[in-house]
Amino acid sequence: MSERRPDALVGENIASLTPYVPGKPIEELRRERGLEGEIAKLASNENPLGPSPKAIAAAQAALLEAHLYPDGGAFYLRKRLGEYLGVDPARIIAGNGSNELLEILARTFCRPGDHVVVSAHAFVIYKLIAQASDLEISEVPMAPGLQMDLVAMAEAIRPDTRLVFLANPNNPTGTWFGRDPFEAFLDTLQRRNLRPLVIMDEAYTEFATAPDFPDSLRYHDRYDRLVTLRTFSKCYGLAAFRVGYGVAHPSLIDYMNRVRAPFNTGRVAQAAAIGALDDAEFLAASVALNEAGRVQLKEGLQALGLEVFPSMANFVLCRLPRPGAEVFDRLLQRGVIVRPMAGYGLPDCIRVSVGTAAQNTRFLQALAEVLDGEGQGG
């Protein structure tokens, strides 16, 4: 009997998927390039201050109960989040990072063939999840300046649209939209009697300091199919714990909980997240460091003659005079890790996370060498 090909076991929607490629780990770079000394990892939008000390203390205490299963409903985390956000805990769901909640939304509210709307140059996971769920995807081009075009996205919504993915600030561009275009977007849905779930991915919202930056939690009464997703991985410095949360109408949360895997957030992770919420000083320090670092990177990149896109996140996107993958590779040899953006349709761009002042300086010096020092061995 002839052996069937492995890809015969899956549909075309799965066979054609391209796996998500995260930022290169420090350990992998050392192994591949034989590098020693400090590596500046500025690829994954991690907090250069590390984790919140109060979060670590809470996690260490929770380790003494590591033999016990976690609270499957994350009761105390949701309770603390409710107090922190001014939201009924019944409107909150915890997830294994906000990424898991994106998957739960697709599994809960979509059937194969349903329609979703995404923006070009947005977090690639939106498209991967939609493709894996066998959904029809409309990808809307961005406006000039790599701004998410909410007017065009509203026009792309159809009566059969189930999900609309909005990211504010957007990854990987760092660009954002203000209250006026967001309110106009919601008004358009109401006027046209359209009822998709609008997913507001706010993974970087704590870093946003623009005066007109909208807090989507304030709009849930205005549009009851609005879902806000946030994470502890970025500003709170808890990327290794994988804790995120969603806020939505209780009926939507109820359906998501029916699909959510049992114990999807661990006991230690829940404790760390609660500790982080109690560490206002650490949060303020993280935001201040990031604000100064964004300015440092922007001014340094512009001094090199590069186009820099405005950012309200903890990273900066810039356009290069040569392929980003080439610059990325040459920076690796100098012990600096950034993210090339070809996978996001931006082959001449790199994204650099905001680091400490010393890390930012090291990146800028290394980039100057790469751009100017080809004659000295690249």
Image (cartoon, rainbow, N blue to C red):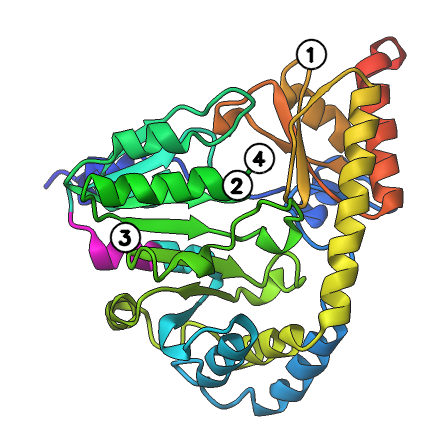
Q: Is residue 192 left or right of residue 51?
A: left
For the residues labelled 3 and 4, say whether their Cβ atoms are less than 8 Å apart: no
Which is nearer the eye, 263 or 37? 263
- Prevalent SS, magenta region: helix
Mark 4 lies on a secondary structure that is loop
Residue at the (51%, 19%) spot, across then down: 144
Residue denoted by label 3: 106
Residue at the (52%, 70%) spot, across then down: 85
Instruction: Assess disc 1: are there few (<14), some (14-19) or many (≥20) residues with their C-alpha within 10 Å of its C-alpha.
Output: few
Q: CA distance from mark 4 to mark 2?
A: 10 Å
Residue denoted by label 1: 321
**Mark 2 vs mark 1: in front:** 2
Q: Amino acid at mark 2?
A: Gly
Q: Is residue 4 left or right of residue 205?
A: left
Mark 3 or 1, nearer chain start: 3
Q: Which residues are magenta?
A: 103-111
Q: Amino acid at mark 1?
A: Pro
Which quadrant of the view contains residue 368? Answer: top right
